């Protein structure tokens, strides 16, 4: 298998924003012109070296990229199988790779002359990343967050307010990410003239799933170069957690044309698939439309969206990025789920063995690697996307563990 | 000619505008929706829009969000709502239009839905989160069963979209008066008349205006330059205000009647 310097990207989505049958634009007419404008401006920016330079500058000197690809000797030894690498996205400024996307989108918003940005947030990481970049450029910023998430991520709520953002509680539905997106979309419909909606994942109507993916593929491009440098070959497995799916698609995408590289997306199994209290869209979801895109959606037989459960606010969402659905059907990416309990154990394991406290979201990826690694040979390579640091989760975990 | 076209043709002959009330089906229960539908026809509604409650109504403001919640809590489903449409149809002759987010219809099955809706006596369908770009499968199903697919235009729609949507929309064009979600507003947007006039060169089809029309005064003004006045949240607010009262049907009917007098240019008592 010839190794390419950069992973070639398949030409998806199509002109209308479709990944096979998935994706598209399912939004009120009021937003259609704004989406068209966004796509136009995004394509212009992509073709403009000055935009790319500006983005690269901020990614490097402000966000701290590139992040290291760290060989975890102790996990490799403890699991007794493959060699385990951690892509240290937890070391990005703000503690998660969300900032790759918020820098890209807010630079774009400035080009479009928007003075105000809004965003939804689940775990608070995207809200913090948006508030951070809004502060950097002096933009007005409002973040929508479910009250249940505000309760379990109180530290991030304080951080956003400290950064000068207005945090608006959303007390509807399940009071989590899904409801925060509803409210952010209502704001956008109302203020579309002066406001850019900084959507935080590969969700929503076209061009968001494409644009957010493009901003996040820097993770995979770096990882590709780094593993080639360290090991002289591509990894056997890439493992990442999948909420909306931006950190995972960001890691996976530059490897899609390398058939020898297997990819595993880890969903939130919550209290267990059999309990119905989870966010594993690929284990019991069906074709549906939520928040502007056609994808796998957890819903009841009447098409009402189901409430989800996960210990991790960032994975607690009933739909998933449309590109994931596409690669799932193709069998190119495999999806598994990890329960709350397993994720909590991995959270502690990584803290003790490596001195790295991971976010609960990516603790799901670590937990799956723990199952996979012992089944592999000693010379096989696993890359886990460590997509967030766990400071925000410490209080919640302390409560859960009774410590 | 279907019921919607007949209604607008008849009104046009008399130089009148359509009054189009919207209520959420099953708010607070199916019995109330049925009685209200009949009351509305008697008191001057020309077309009735029935909303299908959805767990995530992102185009709706607080009033209709709460109405959806009340209906869902009492077990409203799209299937049961089609049963309700059939019941209403048994003694109503005005056009019945369903307004639903796309997911419940997609889940039901597009062909099955159009077939069942048509045989229940439904005349038209509005899907606020389905722009024409994604609507072809639904259009095909609706056409096969004689259901009108009604599209929306917004203040942000550029000329190219006005042209496209004017061509595609059947029955009438739903003009969203403002940038924002549904909900009663104190004022109409200032340039509404010219916004409606901007659509006219593209179509002969009736243009009905909705979102934010809350008072008889506002309804009268909108009737001056549109072909239909859609009143949703203001009516749903009346339902909410009179929940649990024995004379809810009459009281909400009184409100509708004041709207009717207003758009006919008669004195109204608010």
Image (cartoon, rainbow, N blue to C red):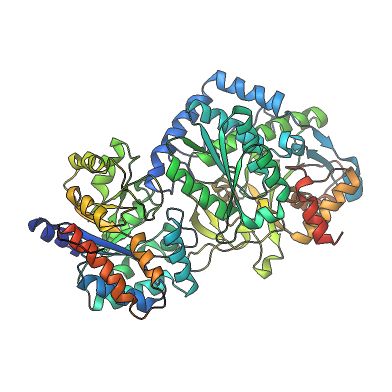
Q: In which quarter of the image is the C terminus of chain B?
A: bottom left
Q: Which residue is drawn at 44% across and 72% down?
A: B76
Q: Is residue B170 visible?
A: no
Tell me: B136 left or right of A142.
Answer: left
Point 55% across, 60% down: residue = A172
Decide if residue B168 is on the left or right side of residue A380.
Answer: left
Q: Which residue is drawn at 38% across and 64% down?
A: B237
Can you tell which quarter of the image residue B214 is in? bottom left
What residue occupies the far left of the structure in this picture? Answer: B13
Q: Measured from the top left, where is residue A132 in percent x and y?
A: 65, 34
Quadrant including the N terminus of chain B: bottom left
> What is the x, y in percent for residue B192?
27, 43
As drawn, is A169 to the left or to the right of B232? right
Q: In this view, does A154 lie above or below B54?
A: above
Q: Residue furthest bottom?
A: B246
| Closer-to-camera residue (B261/A211) | B261
Can residue B48 be spotted in the picture? Answer: yes
B159 or B248: nearer the viewer:
B248
């Amino acid at each position: 298998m010839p190794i390419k310097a950069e992973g070639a990207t398949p030409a998806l989505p199509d002109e209308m924003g479709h990944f096979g049958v998935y994706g598209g634009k399912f939004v009120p007419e009021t937003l259609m012109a704004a989406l068209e404008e966004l796509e136009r401006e995004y394509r212009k920016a992509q073709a403009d070296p000055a935009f790319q330079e500006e983005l690269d500058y901020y990614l490097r000197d402000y966000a701290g990229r590139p992040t290291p690809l760290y060989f975890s000797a102790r996990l490799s030894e403890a699991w007794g199988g493959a060699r385990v690498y951690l892509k240290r996205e937890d070391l990005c400024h703000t503690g998660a790779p969300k900032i790759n996307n918020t820098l890209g989108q807010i630079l774009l918003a400035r080009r479009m002359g928007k003075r105000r940005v809004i965003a939804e947030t689940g775990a608070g990481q995207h809200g913090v990343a948006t508030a951070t970049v809004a502060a950097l450029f002096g933009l007005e910023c409002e973040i929508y967050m479910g009250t249940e998430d505000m309760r379990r991520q109180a530290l991030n709520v304080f951080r956003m307010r400290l950064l000068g953002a207005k945090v608006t509680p959303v007390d509807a539905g399940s009071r989590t990410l899904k409801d925060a997106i509803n409210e952010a979309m209502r704001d956008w419909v109302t203020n579309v003239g002066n406001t850019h909606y900084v959507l935080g994942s590969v969700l929503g109507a076209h061009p968001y799933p494409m644009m957010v993916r493009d901003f996040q593929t820097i993770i995979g491009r770096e990882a590709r170069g780094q593993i080639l440098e360290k090991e002289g070959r591509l990894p056997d497995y890439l493992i990442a957690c999948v909420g909306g799916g931006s950190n995972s698609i960001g890691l996976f995408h530059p490897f899609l044309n390398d058939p020898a590289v297997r990819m595993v997306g880890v969903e939130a199994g919550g209290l267990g698939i059999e309990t119905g209290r989870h966010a594993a869209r690929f284990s019991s979801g069906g074709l549906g439309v939520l928040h502007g895109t056609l994808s796998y959606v957890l819903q009841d037989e009447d098409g009402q969206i189901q409430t989800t459960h996960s210990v991790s606010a960032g994975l607690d969402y009933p739909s998933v990025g449309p590109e994931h659905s596409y690669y799932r059907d193709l069998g190119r990416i495999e999806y598994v789920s990890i329960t709350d309990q397993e994720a909590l154990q991995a959270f502690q394991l990584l803290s003790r063995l490596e001195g790295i406290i991971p976010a609960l979201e990516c603790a799901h990826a670590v937990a799956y690697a723990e199952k996979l690694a012992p089944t592999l040979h000693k010379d096989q390579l696993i890359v886990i996307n460590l997509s967030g640091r766990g400071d925000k989760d410490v209080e919640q975990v302390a409560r859960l563990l009774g410590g | 000619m279907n019921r919607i076209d007949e209604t607008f043709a008849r009104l046009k002959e008399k130089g009148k505008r359509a009054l189009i009330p919207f209520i959420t089906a099953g708010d607070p229960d199916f019995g109330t929706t049925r009685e209200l539908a009949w009351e509305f026809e008697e008191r001057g509604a020309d077309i009735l829009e029935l909303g299908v409650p959805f767990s995530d109504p992102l185009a709706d403001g607080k009033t209709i969000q709460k109405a959806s919640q009340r209906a869902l809590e009492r077990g409203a489903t799209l299937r049961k709502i089609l049963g309700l449409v059939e019941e209403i149809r048994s003694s109503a002759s005005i056009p019945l239009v369903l307004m639903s987010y796309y997911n419940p219809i997609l889940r039901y099955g597009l062909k099955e839905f159009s077939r069942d809706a048509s045989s229940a006596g439904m005349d038209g369908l509005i899907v606020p989160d389905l722009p024409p770009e994604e609507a072809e499968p639904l259009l095909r199903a609706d056409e096969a069963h004689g259901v009108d697919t009604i599209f929306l235009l917004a203040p942000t729609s550029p000329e190219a979209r006005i042209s496209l949507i004017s061509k595609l929309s059947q029955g009438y064009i739903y003009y969203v008066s403002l940038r924002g979600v549904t909900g009663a507003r104190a004022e109409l947007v200032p340039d509404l008349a010219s916004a409606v006039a901007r659509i006219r060169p593209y179509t002969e089809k009736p243009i009905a205006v909705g979102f934010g029309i809350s008072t008889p005064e506002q309804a009268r003004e909108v009737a001056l330059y549109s072909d239909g006045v859609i009143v949703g949240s203001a009516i749903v607010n009346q339902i909410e205000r009179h929940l649990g009262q024995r004379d809810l049907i009459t009281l909400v009917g009184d409100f509708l009647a004041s709207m009717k007098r207003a758009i006919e240019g008669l004195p109204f008592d608010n």
